[in-house]
Amino acid sequence: MKSQPLIDEGSEKIFTIRKISDFAEDEIEHNLMPHLHDFYSIFWIDSGEAIHATEFVEYSLKADTVLFVPPGLKHRMYIDQSVTGIYMLFNEEFIQYNQKNHMPLKEYRLFNNPEFKSLIKVVPEKKDKLKNITGFIFDEFQHSDDYSQEIILNLLHLFLLESRRIFDQQYEAPKEEMDSTPDVTIIKFKQLIEKNYQLQKNVSSYAEMLNMNPSCLNEVAKKTTGITAGELIRNRVIEETKKLLYSSSLSGKEIAFQLGFDDPAYFSRFFRKYTGTTLKDFRDHSRKKYH
């Protein structure tokens, strides 16, 4: 998606804010296609209705709804010309800037939660406060000086804290200690999958990394996501396979080796068993559908 010049241009820190009504037609069309981002984004729908869909769930975003999208999530979004609101994007490097006690964004339930409830409804008594915050961010972004980056960063933190407060109230977040919650365990598990799925595909390896037994990890996974730990690992492998089939010219054999399978024939059977289609049929169908 296009953006205005990024704050602190030339560094690794990224932030921008825009009005949704300013999106160009080609940006709207781009959002209709499944795509990934390497940054965090927030959509506040002020009026109209947008549709946000992932591989797991579809949201109807009506007026006064705020959606939080993490990096690496394949999604698509329908936004017509009647939709108004704001859009912010930023990365972890920007959020970390000058923050001594930084909680990584990936640990925010706003952006990562097993129920895929990554949105809040802005109630009237909270709306003015959040509007004021985003209004100040807009003003600093459009009339920046040497102080603007830190001011915007603090305002963004304030917006996220207020949003987390609303989120916890609306979804009744558990009060356990942070390191002991099932949500944190599953987030850590998903992070480990992301780093290791090409080499490690059995539950016991991940359980060892998490200092727990495999049956306990399966229980936590089932409780928080509705599927087993093994299915989470397998789904990540299938997701990457689909991505490579759709976006690359690699052969099935090459994809098998890239994903850590020594036997391409077994890899083909694995994919067909869990998707109901062959590698070739999936590639042909997906390219016909989205090209």
Image (cartoon, grey):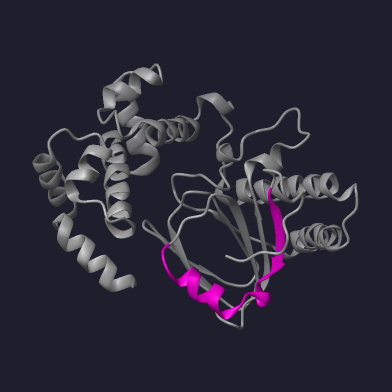
User: Percent position (x, y) of residue 172?
Assistant: 57, 45
For the point 27% across and 66% down, which residue is it?
286
- Regarding residue 79, the answer to whether it shows in the image is no
Q: Is residue 64 a member of the stretch shown in magenta?
A: no
Comparing 96 with 291, the one in front is 291
Above/below status of 286 relative to 239: below
Q: Quadrant of residue 291?
A: bottom left
Q: Quadrant of residue 154?
A: top right
- So how many labels did they put on this image? 0
For the point 57% across and 65% down, which residue is it?
1
Query: Viewed as shown, does residue 86 lie left or right of 254?
Result: right
For the point 15% across and 42% down, which residue is it?
267
User: Percent position (x, y) of residue 162?
Assistant: 72, 49
Q: Is residue 26 a member of the stretch shown in magenta?
A: yes
- Regarding residue 109, the answer to whether it shows in the image is yes
Comparing 6 with 184, the one in front is 6
For the point 37% across and 34% down, which residue is it?
193
Above/below status of 3 relative to 154: below
User: Percent position (x, y) of residue 100?
Assistant: 76, 28
Q: Which residues are magenta?
A: 14-34
Query: Viewed as shown, does residue 243 lie left or right of 119?
Result: left
Comparing 252 with 133, the one in front is 252
Query: Viewed as shown, does residue 135 lie left or right of 67?
Result: right
User: Percent position (x, y) of residue 125?
Assistant: 76, 61
Above/below status of 11 relative to 119: above
